[in-house]
Image (cartoon, rainbow, N blue to C red):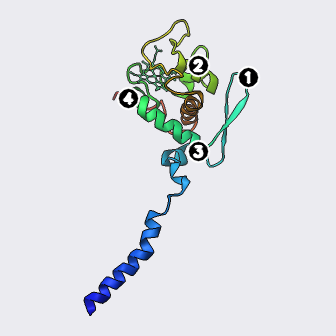
Amino acid sequence: MLRHGVFVCFLLGMLIILPLVLAPQPVLAATDSYVNRYLKASEPVALESDADGNTRLFSADDFSAGKVLFEQNCLNCHVGGANLPDPNISLSLADLKGATPPRDNINSLVAYLREPMTYDGSEETFWCRQVPESWMPQAQIENLAAFIIRAAQKAPGWGVENFES
Ligand code: HEC
């Protein structure tokens, strides 16, 4: 009798718990915890899209999508915004701004990723990874660029930590 009771309790318990476990997860899960914590994007963030000061809004989900692309394709050489093969050209805001032309707005950074140039802008470089349209369509590469610029603006240590020591 007792064992019977335990079994019935178990069944009732499962009836209550299972729908909770199987329920669709809320969309919130898409936002990365690093993005929440460091990129300060609980409200959409306006980033400069060109050198004339025009801006475009990016949401926490856009930054999260950009972060995934960065982790999958760029992290090996640019962990934490550094540049392991060429430490002088990091992804810090100062280094992005200092390039010719500056790479600290969405369009100029996308242009760089589509066709990487040397720091002085004089010729193509083959050291960084080129990102053609066939691989990352415009909306995706803009999220990637937005993640980099926002991390350079806000994330502690981005591009300024020295990973060599
Ligand atoms: C194999 C290593 C490697 C990979 C992978 C790589 N990069 Fe680079 N990246 C470099 C090197 C080296 C440079 C400096 C190139 C030069 O100026 O000749 C560079 C430069 C850059 C710059 C310019 C930084 C500045 O201050 O001007 C940006 C932005 C950049 N990379 C972004 C990316 C992104 C985004 C990805 C992923 C899609 C990526 N890189 C993948 C090696 C890499």
Residue under pointer 1: 52
118 sits to left or right of 59: left
Instruction: Judge: label 4 CB < 8 Å from ligand 1.
Output: yes
Secondary structure state at the residue bearing disc 3: helix
Q: Label 3, on which residue?
A: 60
Q: Residues within 10 Å of mark 4 (few under 14, many from 20)?
A: few
Q: Residue at x 55, y 53 (%)?
A: 27
Q: Is residue 9 or residue 31 the one in the foreground?
A: 9
Q: Is mark 1 within 8 Å of ligand 1?
A: no
- The yes-or-no answer for disc 2 within 8 Å of ligand 1 is no
Above-or-below relation of 30 to 163: below
Look at mark 4 in the image and give the residue it sits on. 76
Residue 140 drawn at (x, y percent) = 55, 32
Q: Earlier in the sequence, mark 2 or mark 1?
A: 1
Q: Position of residue 17 (x, y in %)?
A: 43, 72
Cα–Cα span, label 2 and label 1? 16 Å
Which residue bears the numbered disc 2?
111
* Mark with earlier residue (4, 2): 4
> Which quadrant: the N terminus?
bottom left
Q: Residue placed at 58% from the left, 33% from the top?
A: 146
For the residues bearing labels 2 and 3, Cβ distance under 8 angstroms: no
Residue 108 rendering spot, x and y as whole percentages: 61, 21
Q: Is residue 153 visible to the viewer in this orientation of the structure?
A: yes
